[in-house]
Amino acid sequence: MQQQRRSTADQFVDTAVTALPDDAIVGRESHENAPAIVTRADRVQTVLSTLRSVAGLDHCSCVTAQEYDDRFETVYHLTSYDDRTRELSVVVPTTKDDPVSESAAPVYRTAEWHEREAYDLLGIEYEDHPDLRRLLLTETWQGHPLREDYDQTAPQVVPLREHADPLQADDRHEDSDTMFINIGPHHPSTHGVLHLETTLDGEQVADVEPDIGYIHRCEEQMCQQGTYRHQIMPYPDRWDWGGAGLLNEWAYARVIEDLADIDVPEYALVIRTMSADGTETPARFKIRGPSFSHLSALPAMARGEYVADLVATIGSLDAIMGEVDR
């Protein structure tokens, strides 16, 4: 069955490559989960547009970037909404000293923020990108943290910029007064991980600029220098502040255990399953609790607190479950 699936994938790639310009394709690669083609950095939009219109790959599910000894690479993971088994990766290598590539954002809107992340952390520049700027780090950040030559000991001097109305006077009516306010990053509704730079025109929201970088700590590079259990394991908790942190820990632990060929005792699997299932209850009541308060549902909310205490005792979710109002 696996061999038949690989044969079908190869036929699909052959058909897709035939529709592409000859000078755009550099080579082909065999990846574990999907076949891949390698294209020139200055023909990205041509290749992706053809694959979308001719091959039916209408969804860019993810964009990843990586630094190697002699190059940078951007990989666009394409698939079809109608048939998710049809997958193709488009690999775009660039030189090490001048990592510049065409942007895929004009073809796939989903690539816009992915490319911003690659630019932010690796310094790959994407020509024709509609808004190429940092995504997770501040604009004043020095260097790109996922590069091999990044100096973690270098000081980061980030000046506090003076707040200003981002809307120019000629963009608004002369009688209109706008007000710039910050929602977050410590507003209760944002959990401290989201900052909304908001411009109000009276009671109307005129403009919103989201800043999602308040939880990012360049975890990928920190993992390269830390130990598995005590220094890295707490970080998956922070992927979800709503109560599913233990589930993220479990996923991370399984990867490490598979790589190291570790046999997990049965009692540990039972505790993991019970605790993971228990994380759902406090999160659900935390969300629904305020709307249930007028329905005399406070006893049910209390049961959610008990489950939160149990999970916090078993695992390392004390910080997360501590957010359940007691």
Image: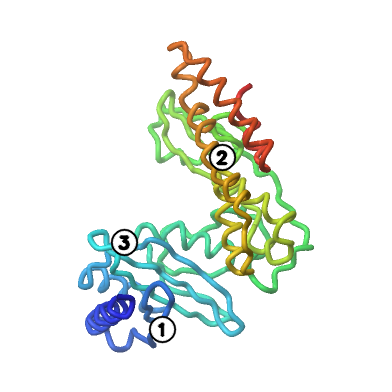
Q: Position of residue 248 (x, y in %)?
A: 56, 50
| SS class, disc 2 | strand
Q: Position of residue 194 (x, y in %)?
A: 56, 40
Front one among 286 and 106 = 286
Instruction: Report the residue at 67% width, 73% height from top.
Output: 148
Front one among 281 and 264 = 264
Instruction: Report the residue at 58% width, 75% height from top.
Output: 67
Q: Which mark is residue 59?
A: 3
Q: Position of residue 272 (x, y in %)?
A: 58, 46
Counting residues from the N terminus, which is met first, the one under dot 1 or under dot 2? 1
Counting residues from the N terminus, which is met first, the one under dot 1 or under dot 3? 1
Quarter of the image that includes the C terminus: top right
| SS class, disc 3 | strand
Pointer 1 with pointer 3, Cβ within 8 A: no
From the viewer's perspective, is 146 left or right of 55? Answer: right
**Mark 1 or mark 3, whichever is nearer to me:** 1
Categorize mark 3 by other alpha carbons within 10 Å: few (<14), some (14-19), many (20+): many
Residue highlighted by disc 2? 195
Q: What distance separates the C-alpha of mark 1 from that of mark 3?
A: 21 Å
The part of the image, by quadrant, that contains residue 34 is bottom left
Front one among 84 and 21 = 84
Q: Which mark is residue 29?
A: 1
From the viewer's perspective, is 2 left or right of 41? Answer: left
From the viewer's perspective, is 8 left or right of 66? Answer: left
Q: What distance separates the C-alpha of mark 2 from that of mark 3?
A: 29 Å
Categorize mark 2 by other alpha carbons within 10 Å: few (<14), some (14-19), many (20+): many
Q: Decide: is 159 above or below 252.
A: above
